[in-house]
Image: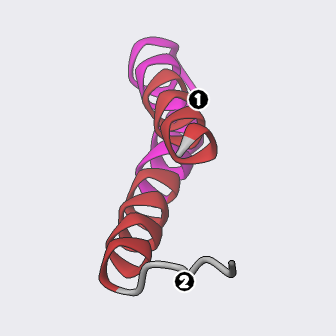
Amino acid sequence: MVVFLLVILVAVVLGIIGAVAGGLFYLLIIGCVLLVADLVYGVVRLRHPRQRHR
């Protein structure tokens, strides 16, 4: 869960930097791709929860 939230935070920061700084549009694209990939990972993980061994 920590990794999921950290990747979302990094994606948002990259998106903000890419939108504000001139000439760094590629950071906005990388941030968007990273956000989408992380959301897909989160959905897959929620649908298939890991089974814990006793």
Observer-nearest of 3 and 17:
3
Image point 58% across, 31% down: which residue?
A: 10
Observer-nearest of 14 and 50:
50
Image point 51% across, 18% down: which residue?
A: 17
Question: Dot 1: few (<14), some (14–19), or many (≥20) neighbours within 10 Å?
Answer: some
Left or right of 43 in this view: 17: right
Residue at the limit of the structure toward the front, as seen here:
54
Observer-nearest of 12 and 19:
12
In the image, residue 43 lies at what x, y percent? 32, 72
Residue at the limit of the structure toward the right, as seen here:
54
Name the element at disc 2: loop
Figure quadrant of the C terminus = bottom right
Q: Classify 41 as above or below 30.
A: below
Image point 34% across, 72% down: which residue?
A: 46
What amino acid does circle 2 point to?
Gln
Magenta: main secondary structure equals helix
Indicate yes or no whether the magenta region holds residue 22.
Answer: yes
Q: Earlier in the sequence, mark 1 or mark 2?
A: 1
Badge 2 is on which residue?
51
Observer-nearest of 21 and 33:
33
Left or right of 51 in this view: 39: left
Indicate yes or no whether the magenta region holds residue 11.
Answer: no
Q: CA distance from mark 1 to mark 2?
A: 42 Å
Q: Which residues are magenta?
A: 14-33
In the image, residue 44 lies at what x, y percent? 39, 81
Question: Dot 2: few (<14), some (14–19), or many (≥20) neighbours within 10 Å?
Answer: few
Badge 1 is on which residue?
24
Q: State which mark lies toward you, 1 or 2.
A: 2
Image point 58% across, 29% down: which residue?
A: 24
